[in-house]
Image (cartoon, rainbow, N blue to C red):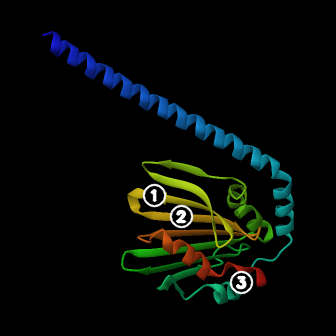
């Protein structure tokens, strides 16, 4: 009888210890996330003047034309053909979207030109995000800041759909978003390189 009680006590202590460990880990994660949020807020505040100057500068520029976007948009990406595209759908705002897919593999590319009154505001979330640093991970996937082809990128991975999302504010003007499905991580750098984003600056 004493042996049974002792075993029950040991099991209870083990469960309590495990519970305490989980709570401690959870609290540690929350503190870490809060610290990152505070650091990011400080970075954004520090860059506030620069962002305002960027908005003023972009407002005085002309957005890319439909013809310019068409000449830039690749016909193939990661060995997949361009299957649909949309260019300058919103009046007064330069934008370009393209979808590439073969079977279950798919890449969606979206570019918003920050030039003009509408564009300068439209790229706002990307401008702000570019001043932050991300590094979070969980059962759902991960989000972190990485450099791809010398470009600062916010890279998110969602386990449930095996999909990646790359977002960036390129050349202090273009909001770029790349979403993939059933594409491996190694191919992401290839996609960014094949987009030849530097060509957008030449127009």
- Label 3 close to label 2 by CB (< 8 Å): no
* Closer to the camera in the image, 144 or 108: 144
- Label 2 close to label 1 by CB (< 8 Å): yes
- Whether residue 36 can be seen here: yes
Reading the chain from its start, which is encountered first: label 1 or label 3? Answer: 1
Q: Which mark is residue 165?
A: 2
Residue at image point 35% right, 22% down: 16
The residue under label 3 is 199
Could you say which quadrant of the image residue 168 lies in?
Answer: bottom right
Q: What distance separates the C-alpha of mark 1 from that of mark 3?
A: 30 Å
Q: Considering only vertical position in the picture, is 54 above or below 37? A: below
The residue under label 1 is 158
* Closer to the camera in the image, 55 or 181: 181
Q: Which mark is residue 64?
A: none
Q: Decide: few, some or many residues near mark 2? Use Cα within 10 Å; few <14, some 14-19, many ≥20.
A: many
Q: Secondary structure at mark 3?
A: helix
- Label 1 close to label 3 by CB (< 8 Å): no
Reading the chain from its start, which is encountered first: label 2 or label 1? Answer: 1
């Amino acid at each position: 009888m004493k042996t049974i009680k002792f075993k029950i006590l040991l099991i209870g202590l083990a469960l309590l210890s495990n519970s305490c460990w989980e709570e401690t880990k959870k609290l540690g994660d929350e503190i870490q996330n809060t610290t990152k949020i505070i650091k990011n807020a400080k970075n954004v505040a520090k860059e506030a003047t620069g962002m305002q100057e960027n908005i003023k500068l972009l407002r005085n520029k002309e957005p890319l034309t439909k013809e310019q976007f068409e000449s830039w948009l690749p016909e193939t990406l990661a060995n997949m053909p361009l299957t649909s595209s949309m260019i300058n759908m919103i009046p007064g705002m330069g934008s370009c979207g393209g979808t590439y897919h073969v079977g279950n593999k798919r890449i969606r590319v979206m570019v918003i030109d920050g030039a003009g009154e509408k564009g300068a505001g439209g790229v706002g979330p990307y401008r702000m995000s570019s001043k932050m640093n991300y590094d979070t991970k969980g059962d759902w996937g991960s989000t972190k800041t990485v450099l791809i082809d010398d470009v600062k990128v916010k890279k998110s991975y969602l386990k449930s759909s095996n999909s990646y999302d790359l977002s960036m504010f390129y050349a202090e003007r273009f909001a770029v978003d790349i979403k993939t499905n059933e594409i491996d991580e190694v191919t992401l750098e290839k996609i960014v390189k094949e987009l030849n984003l530097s060509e957008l600056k030449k127009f």
